[in-house]
Amino acid sequence: RKEVEQDPGPFNVPEGATVAFNCTYSNSASQSFFWYRQDCRKEPKLLMSVYSSGNEDGRFTAQLNRASQYISLLIRDSKLSDSATYLCVINYGQNFVFGPGTRLSVLP
Amino acid sequence: EAGVAQSPRYKIIEKRQSVAFWCNPISGHATLYWYQQILGQGPKLLIQFQNNGVVDDSQLPKDRFSAERLKGVDSTLKIQPAKLEDSAVYLCASSPDNSYEQYFGPGTRLTVT
């Protein structure tokens, strides 16, 4: 089993839709969790950290389920500008492991 | 605030040649990372520096890859000799003390022919 797995995608959704991505991880010692966004041929940028209690930033909600070892990202009211690849990142000790990413295309 | 700088942005070399990439992190950031991102995959951590010391280089193919961060600021990543499978984007990132938030540079796109 890979260390970090994500929904394979791509997700093609209309503007205004709600979309959710999942990410599972295998190392139960994982300590910190993040969602990064990567536009085509650009560098990754931090979207949000994921806290145990769940957290929200505008239209974005991140949740962590330690028992089942997964994190999720919910995007409400999708915008065209949300089109990108979403990478989940797991940290344990000094290690950072990126998932393969889930590509989202928001269609007009 | 200036971001992470990398050069060159693009490089095309033939297999068995050598290549070097340069990274200048955000001023004051103690931690510096080098990642390899192959097309269609997520970035893979190659090496992590804390100031000028290596924290983790477990995934660095040490028979051909080397990296250094002299004086705890700039860093260089070298590949010698290159193989076709080294074709990828090489990303440098930095983060400040007491933070796991990583700021990435624009990357160097390497093509090995």
Image (tube, coloured by chain):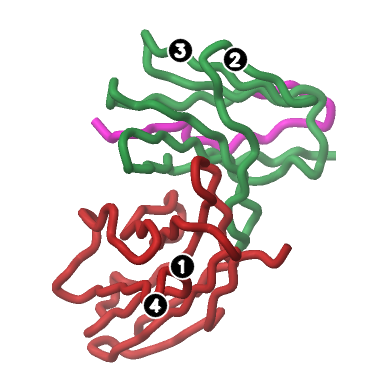
Chain colours: A green, B red
Label 1 crowd (10 A; few <14 / some 14-19 / many >=20): many
Q: Is residue A36 above or below residue B20?
A: above
Q: Is residue B73 above or below residue A5?
A: below
Amino acid type at image mark 3 = Asn
Between A84 and A8, the one lying in front of the other is: A84
Instruction: Give the percent coordinates (x, y) of residue A60.
Output: 71, 26
Q: Could you tell me which secondary element the residue under label 4 belongs to?
A: strand
> Residue A65 has which mark?
3
Label 4 crowd (10 A; few <14 / some 14-19 / many >=20): some
Badge nearest the viewer, 1 or 4: 4
Distance from disc 2 to disc 1, alpha carbons, whole Å, reads 33 Å
Q: Are marks 3 and 1 on the same chain?
A: no
> Residue B112 has which mark?
none
How many numbered tags mark residues here?
A: 4
> Residue B89 has which mark?
1
Q: Is the residue under label 4 in contact with that under label 2 (CB below 8 Å)?
A: no
Distance from disc 3 to disc 4, alpha carbons, whole Å, reads 39 Å
Task: Find residue B70 and report its image quarter.
Answer: bottom left
Q: Quadrant of the C terminus of chain A?
A: top right
Q: Residue, x 52% and y 41% (percent of image)?
A: B99
Instruction: Give the percent coordinates (x, y) of residue B26.
Output: 59, 63
